[in-house]
Amino acid sequence: MSISYQWTPEEQREYSLAKMFKFIKDYVYPYHPYYRKMFKENNIDPDKLNSYDDFRKIPITEKKDTMEDQRAFILQPKTEDSTYDIEEIGKKKKLQYTWKTLTTRYLRDLYGKPRSFEDRVRQTAAGEWLPIHFHASGGTTGDPGLSFYTNYDLKSVVPYIAGMMYLFGWEPTMRALNMYPALPHLAFFQVIFAEFTVDNGGAIFHTCGGKAIPTERQVQIAGGMPFDMYIAIPSYMTYWLKTAIEMIEGGEAKKPDPVKLAVLAAEPLSDEYRDMLKGQFEKIGSPDVKIIEGYGSTELKAAFFECGEKTNIHLNPEFYFWEVLDPDTREPVPWGEPGVITFTHIDWRGSVLMRYWMGDLIGGGVVWEKCSNCGLTMPILRPPIGRAKRDFTKVKGARVPLMNFQNAIRRVEGVESFQVIITKEDEEDQTSRDRVIVYVSLQPGADEEVVKAQITKQVKIDTEISPDQIETEKPEAVEMRLFERTGLKADWVVDKREIHV
Ligand SMILES: [Zn+2]
């Protein structure tokens, strides 16, 4: 039975829990090396999991747990050369594969050398188990984490996640311009998934990023062909729009047809960030664009989106079991209370995680209710979304969410772009005073002294500390700083101190 988004939150939660328990019994316990071992070590009987309290006996999985042996997180039946304690494929499943083989016309048999029926059955089984698609995380938090997808995932799970793009108003006849760089990352591939797996597919042009097609050329493409939707990382979107504005004003490119939707993910979007982007969109002739935020991760194997502007991220309860846990005690918090988002895959193949601690602190918690915008009932993330650890830092003794620097400076009129550096008065001496330097580029006509005074004032309001130094630089110099490290995502705030608590 499939879920209905007309059900009550209680009905959905019951469904999600029951579907997860069945998945644990049928797939995780028999075929998942890591969790099978964990269940045995903790005396957890998968047949006796009946309630959420039972489920909570399962220890939480963190990134460090997955890094020791990433292969142990892939569902896999026992084969002759396998060293893991897992089960072989049972008789019932073998019969299912045999039956399916009888009704499948494989291209392998159309074009390849003759083979036995047994080999054909093996191909059917591989469709469920063999990983055929891979993502690596960006590696901003150390070693890259990997995720693995099988053909089963791409046919039976992924379309139900990628199809959630209809929530924010995507229509089958629309066209999208995907500006994500072509990398083995979820953000780029979820767009590909949508293009090929959702209903009849979708018309999407992939620029493959600024390194594949220079931004100036992309702007010309956008001016020559109508697109309803742009998809990008927020910091690249602002750079792209800035380039477009200059080219249009200089007569080097045509104004693109009005864009209806801008889907932005992989960096948090504050209200100030959205306002700045809206101002830029207005200048290229798209004053009515809706900015839709996305949220995803390699480990999650999917990204989720808002159903409208500022309606918050809608999560999928059919293929995930969601928990929100207290960052310190790791006990569940009530719906709508702040906590760290934690998920369990349901009915995925390939890599599967249980009670995976994403590390993101959801400031407004998760509300599970009927959304007043789309009318569907779903778990919905309420911002702000920050890292439970990394996005907070102590500067000059004050606990500062790094996002606050960005919001404060973006509010200042006349600021084109900026970067904040947190360092030490003496970089060699960790006990010396913290020092905050702001590099800023100005919009044409802005008064340098006025902008500097406003930055000092706004930063003080939002972070309780004052910058020690504000330097103006040419826009290109600030742009270079922002993309210096990754070439992909802007580093708006850089903490250069080695140790800080
Ligand atoms: Zn909604």
Image: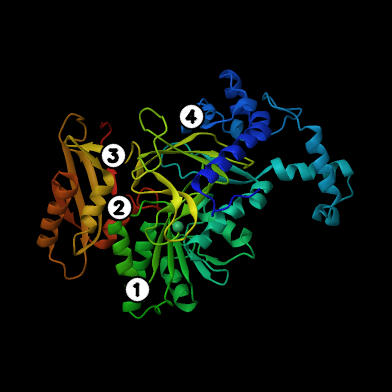
Name the spot of residue 371 as percent of width and height, x first: 44, 56
Question: Which of marks 1 and 3 precedes in the sequence?
Answer: 1
Of badges 3 and 4, nearer the viewer stands 4
Q: Distance between the residues labelled 2 and 1?
A: 30 Å
Tell whether 419 sits left or right of 143. left
Tag shown at residue 481: 2
Name the spot of residue 266 as percent of width and height, x first: 42, 51
Q: Residue shown at 67%/34% (left/top)? A: 27
Q: Nearer the viewer, residue 73 or 198?
A: 198
Q: Nearer the viewer, residue 215 or 463?
A: 463
Residue type beneath disc 4 = Ile
Q: What element carries label 3?
A: strand
Q: Determine if residue 351 is in view.
A: no
Q: How far apart are marks 3 and 1 (CA)?
A: 34 Å
Q: How far apart are marks 4 and 2 (CA)?
A: 38 Å
Residue tagged 1: 287
Q: Residue shown at 51%/66% (left/top)? A: 170
Q: Residue shown at 86%/41% (left/top)? A: 118
Tell whether 81 sits left or right of 425. right
The quadrant where residue 394 appears: top left
Tag shown at residue 60: 4
Q: How far apart are marks 1 and 4 (CA)?
A: 45 Å
Would you call the spot at circle 1 few (<14 residues within 10 Å), some (14-19), or many (20 or more)? some
Q: Is mark 3 within 8 Å of ligand 1?
A: no
Residue type beneath disc 2 = Arg
Q: Dividing the image into four equal quarters, which quarter contains ligand 1?
A: bottom left
